[in-house]
Image: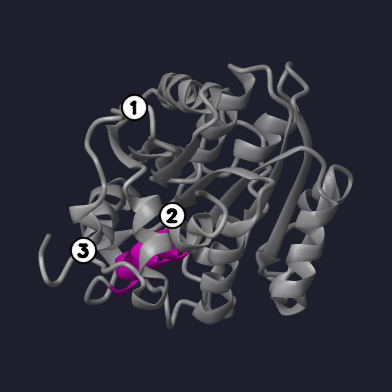
Amino acid sequence: MSADPRLRDFISRKPTELSRVHLLQFPSDQGILTNNGRPGAAQAPDLIRARLFNLTPHASYYQKHTDLLEKVVDAGIIPCSEDVQKDQENLGIAVGKILKFGRMPIILGGGHETSFGHFLGYVNNGKPVTILNIDAHPDVRPLRDGKPHSGSSFRQALEHESALCKAYHVFGLNPATVSFPHYNYVKNTGSALYEGELSKEIILNHVEDAEGDLMVTMDMDAVNQGEAPGVSAPNPSGIDTNLWLQLAYEFGRNEKVTSFDLCEVNPVYDRDLMTVRLGALTVWHFLLGLSMRYR
């Protein structure tokens, strides 16, 4: 072992009986294009992975952190194409296999079309789930010309024929970018909070009240664009990185959370890869939180 160990020194490339966490990449951009957004998020997963692997385990919690990291598998890439629906189905198959064995999928998107594929993993196991999204937008738009996109994932989940999405909660909404119908749609299916209403305690209370498994997704455009400029839809207000990273840690630590994805980092518009680095640090904090519950 190096005198300066990094996460890459612990994470495996092949699953074993001891594996507990599978890290997947879903480099999708087509859903953003369909939603008339600016492409580039497909470049994010590999860049975030590279920065994540170059980070060090937490020195103060070294044994706990590295014990967990040794159970993480670098599970590869789900190929993406212009057929978002097919790509989401393929992601759902991969996530479903991970969930079937009681393991934790962590998915690096891609546009927020990632999250419907993520949800399909629960469908493929017949598992009911509550979805919690940290996001500036509710992403409950209808399909466009019958096609899924980055803004439709959670309407698709809520209206899926399986009826396995039991509730949807979205926190961090930018009030200037959320329509009245979309806000009411979410309020009728779960709960919604604007960015100015957020605190760690409020969100954790919602987590404790959730029933059953909890699928968490974090959309980087919930963060103020001064700290996260490289996103698909820049946010001139947004939450700060301190709260963002606290939430990632707490989600990792909470026993109810059974899967996680990170979406909408767009390296094309980044500055000195600062948003990519924040994405890597987000996953690092989630893994640290996870180490506090896994043995």
The answer to whether 155 is drawn above or below residue 44 in the figure is above
As shown in the figure, which amino acid type bears the numbered disc 1?
A: Glu
CA distance separating discs 2 and 3: 26 Å
Which residues make up the magenta segment? 274-285
Q: Which x, y percent locates residue 184?
A: 86, 51
Q: Specify few, some or many for label 3: CA neighbours under 10 Å numbering under 14, 14-19, or 20 or more.
A: some
Which is nearer the eye, 93 or 54?
A: 54
Q: Which mark is residue 6?
A: 3
Q: Nearer the viewer, mark 1 or mark 2?
A: 2
Q: Which x, y percent locates residue 205?
A: 81, 63
Magenta stretch: includes residue 238: no
As shown in the figure, which amino acid type bears the numbered disc 2?
A: Glu
Q: Which x, y percent locates residue 84?
A: 43, 27
Identify the residue position indicated by label 1 in the image: 82
As shown in the figure, which amino acid type bears the numbered disc 3?
A: Arg
Magenta stretch: includes residue 278: yes
